[in-house]
Image (cartoon, helix red, strand yellow):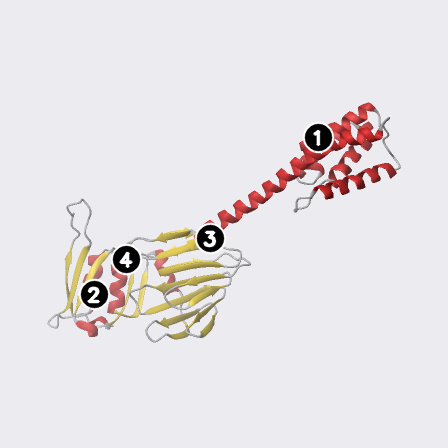
Amino acid sequence: MKQNEQKIYEKLISDQRFVAWASGTNEADDSYWEQWRSRHPEYLPVFEEACETVRMFRFSEVDPSPDEINRQWEQAEQRMRTQTKKLILPSILDWYKRVAAILILPLTIAALWFFYSQFQLKTEFERVANYHQEHQVQVEAPLGGQLVAELPDGSKAWLNSGSTLNYPAVFSREKREVEMSGEIYFQVAKGNEPFFVKNLGPTIQVHGTEFNVHAYENEELVTVALAEGKISLNGNGQQLEVIPGEVVTFNRRSEQLDKQKDDIYPYTCWREGRYIFRNASMGSVLRTLERRYNVSIELRGGEELSQTKYNATISGEPLEQILELLTFTAPLSYEYRKAKVLDDGSFSKAEVVLWKNNNKMVSPKK
């Protein structure tokens, strides 16, 4: 090898940018080194020799021992001696020693640093991922309001008044799992990992779909209505496959699981600010009004009055107008107490008291 070629060779193998590129750890520099080759066609053999030498010293994920370094160097030395296009120096042995001194140190440092950095990055990534998987995010819709949450996988959840949703900041690689209470409409993004919804009733396994879950803590029934896709429910030793247009109810007291065909719209129209009650108990209607208008409602009249069936559609009317409608269609009277300003500047809840009034005339049902 001529003296100038020797300098080029030594410069290349001591260049950390070249070492990273030749060892395959920095492909972003492909264009840079292609331009170098185009500008210096006379040094192509030297360039290829330097590349081959670097590749021979590219370390595996396990750091090599000194014996392994010596063995690789002997193989490199033998290969370079037997190449057809050899680059010869006046004193090849002395030159190899110089190359070894130049090459081994930067390559060792570069390789050790690279794999140490990769190990550190992997460890840090796993630590952060584990932290985020363990770190739960809680979203809560205030009484009287609604909100929309976007989950880490791109899924969306619409939370009705007084609902909560818990999920990890980052889903694991094995599954996507959330926990809820209240009423939530889910729009689940498709993914390889199964999606599970834990609630007060049976666990729901989702297969890329849209569905509504009604599961408030103060209500006996859990209702799941499927709009699109496919879900399966697992609870109390039962597994139920659900298709669009089907509604599943779970009785928390009897642990009975039932499925039927039904119109989905009344179960999902709350997102539009509408509530459709069909043969609903008075108690269920009043609980919905409590959450929707953030008021406290007391019904005096016992269980019989609470179980009175009621049909109505609410579309954002003022609460007092709805109360008038209730007393117009049932023998009820009410007292409405507006919210008050407390000593600390906050507001108390408005209060409503309803009671049965047998002397009151009601509008006949049509």
The mark closer to the camera, 3 or 4, is 3
Helix or strand or loop: what does disc 2 sit on? helix
Q: Amino acid at mark 2?
A: Leu
Q: Which residue is mark 1?
A: 14
Mark 2 neighbour class, 10 Å CA radius: few under 14, some 14 to 19, many 20 or more: some
**Which numbered mark, 2 or 3, is in the foreground of this view?**
3
Q: Are marks 4 and 1 in contact (CB under 8 Å)?
A: no
Q: Which residue is mark 2?
A: 326
Mark 3 or mark 1: which comes first in sequence? Answer: 1
Q: CA distance from mark 2 to mark 4?
A: 16 Å
Residue 195 against residue 31 in the figure, above or below = below
Eyeballing the image, is 328 above or below 170?
below
Q: Which is nearer the eye, 100 or 110? A: 100
Q: Residues within 10 Å of mark 4 (few under 14, many from 20)?
A: many
* Residues tagged 1 and 2 counted as in contact (Cβ below 8 A): no
Residue 197: image x %, image y %? 43, 62
State the image coordinates of residue 355 (x, y, percent, origin top left). 15, 67
Residue bearing mark 4 = 292
> Could you say which disc has been placed on residue 133 in the image?
3
Contact check, label 3 and label 1, Cβ < 8 Å: no
